[in-house]
Amino acid sequence: SGIFCSTNYGTIVNCKNSANVRYSSSSSEGIRAAAICTSNYGDIINCTNEGKVELELIAIYGSWSKATSNCGGICAYSGKGSSIVNCTNTGNINNSGIYFSVTGGIVASSEHASIVGCKNYGLVYSYILNSSPSKGNVTVESYQHQHVGGIAGHVLYCLINRCTNYGTVKSNF
């Protein structure tokens, strides 16, 4: 879920989000949340997030999901040929997953994309749940993992240039 759009194939320019974004789901397919857009296949330029972004993947009683939770300040996922340029995040980013949690101040996960001139000032916090008191116990698996970073949580064949993280990056693992 993104404030301005779910999936961007064009150009988003000079947008600003000041609202808090909170998304919670028990989906076994994986979930994504960000302030500007959920998935980016175009360009995001000069955009700012000032709101808190929270994502929570909830355990279903008696079982748990191996789904990925992706949470970013500007975008949750940025795909091939896309770019995020001169964007700033000042909001706190909180991602609670069960199996695989990917969290970034600007973008959670990015593949074959460019991230240029971006700044993060917010707290970036990734948390893997090992129990859900209201929903029952969940077994912790040895292969549960997190990718968390001030600019990007996970990148594959990306250009990251002139980006700066001023925020605190935390993980419970």
Image: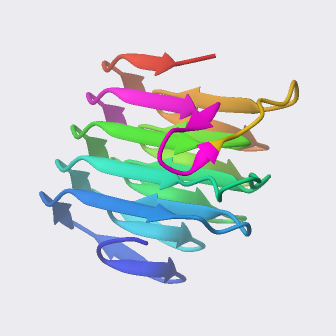
Q: Residue at x 43, y 29 (%)?
A: 125
Q: Residue at x 55, y 54 (%)?
A: 58
Position of the C terminus by quadrant: top right
Question: Total number of numbered labels?
Answer: 0
**150 versus 157 height, above or below:** above
- In this view, the residue in front, 149 or 114, is 149
Q: Is residue 163 visible?
A: no
Q: Residue at x 53, y 27 (%)?
A: 149
Q: What residue range appears in magenta?
A: 117-136
- In this view, the residue in front, 8 or 1, is 1
Q: Residue 167's x, y, as percent?
A: 32, 20
- In this view, the residue in front, 49 or 12, is 49
Position of the N terminus by quadrant: bottom left
Q: Is residue 173 visible?
A: yes
**139 versus 142 height, above or below:** below
- In this view, the residue in front, 53 or 85, is 53
**150 versus 112 height, above or below:** above
Q: Is residue 117 left or right of residue 158?
A: left
Q: Residue 113's x, y, as percent?
A: 65, 54
Q: Residue 12's x, y, as percent?
A: 35, 74
Q: Residue at x 33, y 32 (%)?
A: 120
Q: Is residue 88 magenta?
A: no
The colour style of the image is rainbow
Q: Is residue 134 magenta?
A: yes
- As drawn, which residue projects farthest toward the left? 18
